[in-house]
Amino acid sequence: MTMQTKSKTQATVWVMEKGQVRPRLDHLTTEEPLEIRLTPFQKTVAVTMRTPGADFELAAGFLYSEGVVSRREDIRRISYCVDKLVDGEQRHNIVNVELRDGLIPDLQPLERHFYTSSACGVCGKASLEALRLRGCPMIPSGPTLTPEILYSLPDKLRAAQGIFRATGGLHAAAIFDTQGNLLNLREDVGRHNALDKLIGSAFLSDELPLNNSIVLVSGRSSFEILQKSTTAGVPIVCSVSAPSSLAVSVAKEFGITLIGFLRGERFNIYTGLQRINTLEQR
C-alpha cells in the first residue's frame, strides 16, 4: 500500500515584491476528500474535504457527534480501504468503520452528510430541534474560570499549530484544562473536521465527556461547532471570532458558556456568564 497522503504539499509560487517577481518553494495545506464507510452495511455515510492526518479520529468523532455510536465498544475496528479496485493513492482517502455485532444505527439522518464542505460545514445541517430529539443532556454546572486563563489560550493554540506555521492556511481546535494547560490539539482545513478529530481522540481513549475542559477553535463558532461540543459535554467553548445566532441558541439551550472574539485581554460572553469569575466576584 502506498504511503498516506501528507498534510502539507509543496508548490512553486511567484512572489511579487517592489515590482520584482521571483520564484519560491512554498507549502500548501493538503485538501483531500475522506469517505467514511460503515463496512457491515457497505454504506458511505459521509464524504468530507479534510487535511489528511488523524483520519481514524475524524471518523470516530463524526460518528459519535452524529449519534451513530455512543461508546468506545461500539466500534470494533477502523481501517483504511484495501479494495484492490481502488487506486492505491486513493485508499487512504477511504476509511472503513466496523461496528460491533448487533448495532444497527438509524442511518437515514446521515444522508445529508454525503458531501461535507471544508469551508462551511454540512449543507442542510440538523436544527436545534434535532438536538433536543436526540436527548442531549444539559451540561453540568461548573467549572469557573478567571478571565486571565482565557486570555492566555489563543497564544498557546497558535504556538502549537505546527502545520499552520508551515502553510498559513489551516484551522485548529484545542482542548485545555481549567488551569489553561493545553491537553490536545488537532488541525484541519475545516473547523468542524478539526473538532471531530479532537473529539474522536477523546472518544477512542474513553475520555468523554469533557465536562472539565475548555475548547478553543480558530475562526468562528458555528452551529456545528456547538453541536459537536454539546455531544462531547464541553462546558466552555471559545473562538477568536464571532458565533452565529444558532450557535448562541444551542449554547443557551444546553448550558454552555460561549466566548467569542477572544483576542488579547478582551472577549465577549454570549451565554453562561456564571462560569466566568469577574472582578466583582473576587
Image: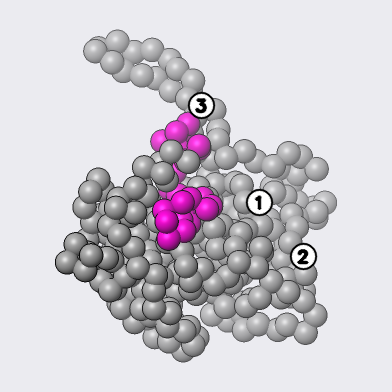
Q: Residue at x 47, y 58 (%)?
A: 177
Q: Is residue 253 magenta?
A: no
Horizontal side of residue 174 vs 71, given as left or right: left
Q: Residue furthest left?
A: 280
Horizontal side of residue 106 vs 98, given as left or right: left
Picture quadrant of residue 250: bottom left
- Tell me the kind of residue under disc 1: Asn
> Which class describes the residues within 10 Å of circle 1: few (<14), some (14-19), or many (20+)?
many
* Numbered range of the magenta stretch: 161-185
> Which class describes the residues within 10 Å of circle 3: few (<14), some (14-19), or many (20+)?
few
User: To which residue does mark 2 refer?
Assistant: 77
Q: Secondary structure at mark 2?
A: strand
Residue 177 in the image: above or below residue 255: above
Q: Nearer the viewer, residue 22 or 177?
A: 177
Closest to the camera, between mark 2 and mark 1, is: 2
Residue 226 in the image: above or below residue 102: above
* Scheme by which the image is coloured: one colour
**Cα distance, mark 2 to mark 1?**
17 Å
Picture quadrant of residue 217: bottom left
User: To which residue does mark 3 refer?
Assistant: 11
- Tell me the kind of residue under disc 2: Arg
Q: Secondary structure at mark 1?
A: helix
Residue 252, image x, y percentages: 31, 78
Q: Which mark is residue 93?
A: 1
Q: Which mark is residue 37?
A: none
Residue 107, image x, y percentages: 61, 80
- Tell me the kind of residue under disc 3: Ala
For marks 2 and 1, the one nearer the N-term is: 2
> Which class describes the residues within 10 Å of circle 2: few (<14), some (14-19), or many (20+)?
few
